[in-house]
Amino acid sequence: QYQYFQRIVAVYEREPDNFPRLMELLQDLQQYGQPPAEIIKQLAPGLEFNPDGMPIMNLGDNVFPKPGDMPNIPGHLPMPDAAAAGCAVS
């Protein structure tokens, strides 16, 4: 993992707009799985993981607006008619 991070940083520093190469390196890095828990704990001390190794995102109650919090947005937005719009997916 460390070597892949070094490669990613080197490419980003030399060619920050080379998205195809950066994506390739990031995809290659995924084969090694999550970084060791000790490193994650140092970088994000409060982060917890589920049994599958995915981070538990406890974002609290204030992430999405509640009804009435945005007075300029109507409570119900009409759904467009897919058939009238010529959309093949409905």
Image: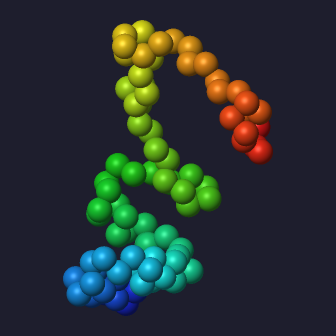
Residue 15 in the image: above or below residue 50: below
Question: For residue 82, what is the image quadrant?
Answer: top right
The foreground one among 82 and 8 is 82
Where does the image place residue 58, in percent across and percent down from the top left?
Answer: 44, 39
The foreground one among 36 and 4 is 4
The foreground one among 63 and 82 is 82
Q: Quadrant of the C terminus?
A: top right
Question: For residue 25, what is the image quadrant?
Answer: bottom left
Residue 75 in the image: above or below residue 16: above
State the scheme by which the image is colored. rainbow
Where does the image place residue 12, in percent across and percent down from the top left?
Answer: 28, 80
The answer to whether residue 40 is left or right of residue 10 is: right
Q: Residue at x 39, y 51 (%)?
A: 47
Q: Quadrant of the N terminus?
A: bottom left
| Res. 59 visible in picture | yes
Where does the image place residue 57, in percent across and percent down from the top left?
Answer: 46, 44
| Res. 1 visible in picture | no
Q: Residue at x 40, y 31 (%)?
A: 63
Where does the image place residue 54, in percent across and percent down from the top left?
Answer: 54, 57
The foreground one among 30 and 53 is 30
Q: Residue at x 41, y 22 (%)?
A: 65
Q: Residue at x 43, y 27 (%)?
A: 64
Question: For residue 52, what is the image quadrant?
Answer: bottom right
